[in-house]
Image: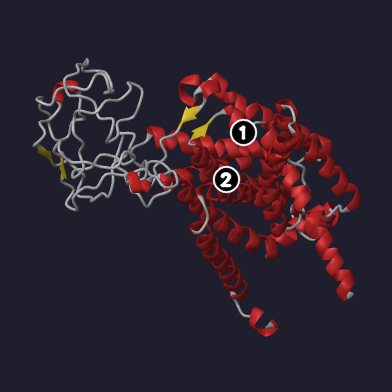
């Protein structure tokens, strides 16, 4: 095995195989869990992506950073601005999509990381911490200065470029209640003499009779269908006491309103763009693919980005650049005598960390479908630092462990507060208190974090 690892590119291939295996396992897990667990997987992958950069910056380079949450804000806002304002990619002219928007977020992260790295290259200890703290506070607040562009305190609501046909996650069991349509996409308006079970939605072959009654606030079902002689203003939604007469006409592509209700024998062929559908969106806003679950797609995206970032980070950490960072961290003077530029090493660490943080911010924006100052506050930066310290600041696996802790701990506190009947204010602040206590314990008992302690234990057992 050692002889094989000496071959050119062997380590690169090994890292690629490891990352691909992990990605395949996560894809299988992601397809077999419920949407809530998909959401948690997406959050863990997003935090891990950002903390891979923290491992390089804090663990390997030895610098203190309290501003990576602000670097995530840069990626999130760049993603939002490009997707909301650009229809095509500049210069290239190709249609803008989520992948291109993440590329712009990554480029922006590199530029800002270079600027911050140059500013902080000559700073150490509390001075560098003060600089990054100012960045963490200042960058998200810039949105308040440019409300027309960045949305101010309310932020920007994203129309994320989901896969075609995807609109929203489906509730469990709701798929069975969708209407049936012909495979060709032609939907027939039903006749009024069919019958159906009360809990079913109306379809072409089970349209109810029109002599049932229903309370105005109820949804229409088979046994509560209203009479057809009610009147309604054209702009109103149809309810039980204002159902229109059935002698109006409507174009095939129009939504049904009281003055455009088709006759009971009419048929319409909606323009579906050549795409067959198996259901109708209950909100009436768009046609959706019943096989699409939003949280599952978000988790798939977050895991894919985390795996790509992990592959890059793994090769940097295990390669020459990782040794350069460690040398500058351990003894800058000795590194400079050996021909290594301490300032250049620190700047490169900031650039890589900012790149990873910007990608994580773009993923976070797609998970939330929103960007705003509140989503990228100082608490996010501190959470990333806490996660790295808990998991192990020099270990990429420790970053994943820290990400799991950041997602799991608030949920654990919430369930505990529900069982104990804690006050809401206590519930909201308990995770921060526990974070602080865990950091103190880790610093005093296990300075290397969970992974560092495990590695030390293994070394003692194996006497290495």
**Which residue occupies the foreground of this view, 292 or 454?**
292
**Residue 360: numbered disc:** 2
- Residue 273: give x, y in percent of width and height: 20, 46
10 Å neighbourhood of mark 2: few (<14), some, or many (≥20)?
Answer: many
> Which is nearer the N-term, disc 1 or disc 2?
2
Q: Is residue 177 visible?
A: yes
Residue at point 51%, 61% (across, down): 27
Q: Distance of mark 1 from mark 2, alpha carbons?
A: 11 Å
Placement of 25 over or under 417, stated as above or below: below
In the displayed structure image, the side of residue 419 where residue 252 appears, left or right:
left
- Residue 359: give x, y in percent of width and height: 55, 46
Q: Can residue 464 be seen in this view?
A: no
**Which residue occupies the foreground of this view, 206 or 130?**
206
Dot 1: what SS?
helix
Residue at point 63%, 47% (across, down): 47
CB-based contact (under 8 Å), mark 1 and mark 2:
no
């Amino acid at each position: 095995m050692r002889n094989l690892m000496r071959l050119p590119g062997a380590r690169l291939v090994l890292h690629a195989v490891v990352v691909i295996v992990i990605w395949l396992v996560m894809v299988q897990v992601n397809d077999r869990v419920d949407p809530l667990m998909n959401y948690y997987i997406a959050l863990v992958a997003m935090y891990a992506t950002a903390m891979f950069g923290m491992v390089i910056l804090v663990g390997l380079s030895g610098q203190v950073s309290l501003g990576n949450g602000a670097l995530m804000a840069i990626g999130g806002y760049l993603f939002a601005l490009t997707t909301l304002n650009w229809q095509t990619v500049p210069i290239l002219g190709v249609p803008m999509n989520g992948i291109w928007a993440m590329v712009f977020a990554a480029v922006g992260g590199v530029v800002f990381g270079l600027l911050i790295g140059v500013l902080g290259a000559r700073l150490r200890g509390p001075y560098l911490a003060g600089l990054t703290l100012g960045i963490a506070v200042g960058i998200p607040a810039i949105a308040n200065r440019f409300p027309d562009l960045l949305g101010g305190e309310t932020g920007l609501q994203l129309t994320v470029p989901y896969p075609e046909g995807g609109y929203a996650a489906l509730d469990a069991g709701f798929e069975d209640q969708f209407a049936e349509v012909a495979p060709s996409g032609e939907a027939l308006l039903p006749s009024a003499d069919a019958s159906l079970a009360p809990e079913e939605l109306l379809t072409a072959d089970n349209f109810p009779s029109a002599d049932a009654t229903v309370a105005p606030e109820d949804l229409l079902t088979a046994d509560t269908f209203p009479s057809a002689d009610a009147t309604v203003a054209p702009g109103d939604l149809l309810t039980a006491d204002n159902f229109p007469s059935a002698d109006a006409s409507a174009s095939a592509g129009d939504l049904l309103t009281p003055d455009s209700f088709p006759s009971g024998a009419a048929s319409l062929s909606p323009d579906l763009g050549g795409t067959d559908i198996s259901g109708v969106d209950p909100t009436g806003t768009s046609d959706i693919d019943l096989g699409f679950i939003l949280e599952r797609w978000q988790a798939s995206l977050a895991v894919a980005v985390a795996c790509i970032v992990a592959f890059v980070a793994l090769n940097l950490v295990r390669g020459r650049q990782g040794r350069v960072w460690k040398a500058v961290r351990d003894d800058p003077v000795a590194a400079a005598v050996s021909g290594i530029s301490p300032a250049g090493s620190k700047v490169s660490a900031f650039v890589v960390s900012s790149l990873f943080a910007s990608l994580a911010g773009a993923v976070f924006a797609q998970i939330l479908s929103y960007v705003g100052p509140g989503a990228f506050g100082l608490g996010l930066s501190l959470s990333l630092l806490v996660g790295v310290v808990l998991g192990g600041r020099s270990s990429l696996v420790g970053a994943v462990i820290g990400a799991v802790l950041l997602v799991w701990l608030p949920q654990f506190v919430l369930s505990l507060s529900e069982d104990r009947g804690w006050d809401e204010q206590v519930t909201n602040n308990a995770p921060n208190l526990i974070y602080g206590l865990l950091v103190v314990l880790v610093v005093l008992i296990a300075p290397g974090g969970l992974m560092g302690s495990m590695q030390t234990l293994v070394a003692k057992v194996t006497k290495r």
